[in-house]
Image (cartoon, rainbow, N blue to C red):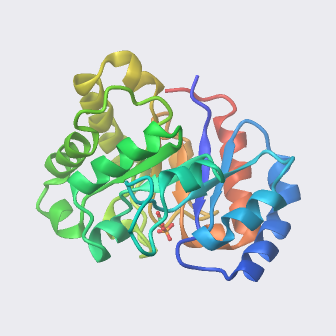
Amino acid sequence: MRVPMIAGNWKMNTTVGEATELVKAMRAGLDQIANVDKVICPPFISLAVVKELIRGSSIRLGAQNLYFEEKGAYTGEISPLMLADLCEFVIIGHSERRQYFNETGEIVNKKLRAALKVGLKPILCIGEKLEENEARRTEEVVTEQLESSLAGIDSLDGLIIAYEPVWAIGTGKAATGRQVSETIGLILYNIAQLYDEEVAQQMRILYGGSVTADNIAEFVQQSEIDGALVGGASLKANEFLSIVRQTSEIKGHLSR
Ligand code: PEP
């Protein structure tokens, strides 16, 4: 049985002080909601503080990125070993990293390997751009991203996939539950081909792209969608709480 998950990607937002306030505003409420993995991914510099603030709660911690080397002369980078000490999850291959920091499939693959090696649970982001979607190339793009990201990786234990159509991220223009379900069907087919049916059945797949408290129900009502990776709305305590609460209520009786 796959446990639903809502992960908040705070992106490059919040000072340490603001992160502290945000965690304090959501901690008690989040802690009361059962049957959903509740993950928050603040900026690197707040991880240690947030780790302390959520100690003893059911809230789990993730980072937004990592570098694939364990240590050395890579000024400004953060290694998997440093993160393994601090958090449980790490977002890899977010479209903003692919777009602004030229992360290729090969780099994403190296990062995934590095994360899995130290026991971090990667949230692998994949998804097509607007022009690819309009040219009906979603299937081709998603398949290629999966193949290049997962090349040579034998075990996907702990891996979570977030399907995030790039045109839906931060635009206020979310996909429909039906569109997402269709693409998740394709992702599952690919996972079954690359691994086997059981791996596909156990794989948690989230949707990401302009999720709000007003539209989360449409997504989590689909049995294929295990939850969401939430950007903007994860910075508002009450809205994030509502997203997690609705997911818990709706998923209480659904399975893929
Ligand atoms: C994201 O950052 O992964 C994301 C989906 O952002 P937003 O919810 O703001 O579209």
User: Up-down: is 25 above or below 92?
Assistant: below
Return the x and y of residue 110 as percentages of the image width and height: 30, 49
Question: Which residue: 50% across, 34% down?
Answer: 158
Return the x and y of residue 102 as percentages of the image width and height: 24, 70
Question: Which residue: 53% across, 43% down?
Answer: 120
Which image quadrant for residue 198?
top left
Regarding residue 239, the answer to whether it shows in the image is: yes
Which image quadrant for residue 143?
top left
Question: Which residue: 67% across, 64% down?
Answer: 47
Return the x and y of residue 85 as percentages of the image width and height: 64, 50
**Which is more toward the observer, 130 or 15?**
15
State which quarter of the image contains the N terminus.
top right
Relative placement, left or right, of 254 versus 50 is: left
Which image quadrant for residue 196?
top left
User: Up-down: is 35 above or below 16?
Assistant: above
Regarding residue 43, the answer to whether it shows in the image is: no
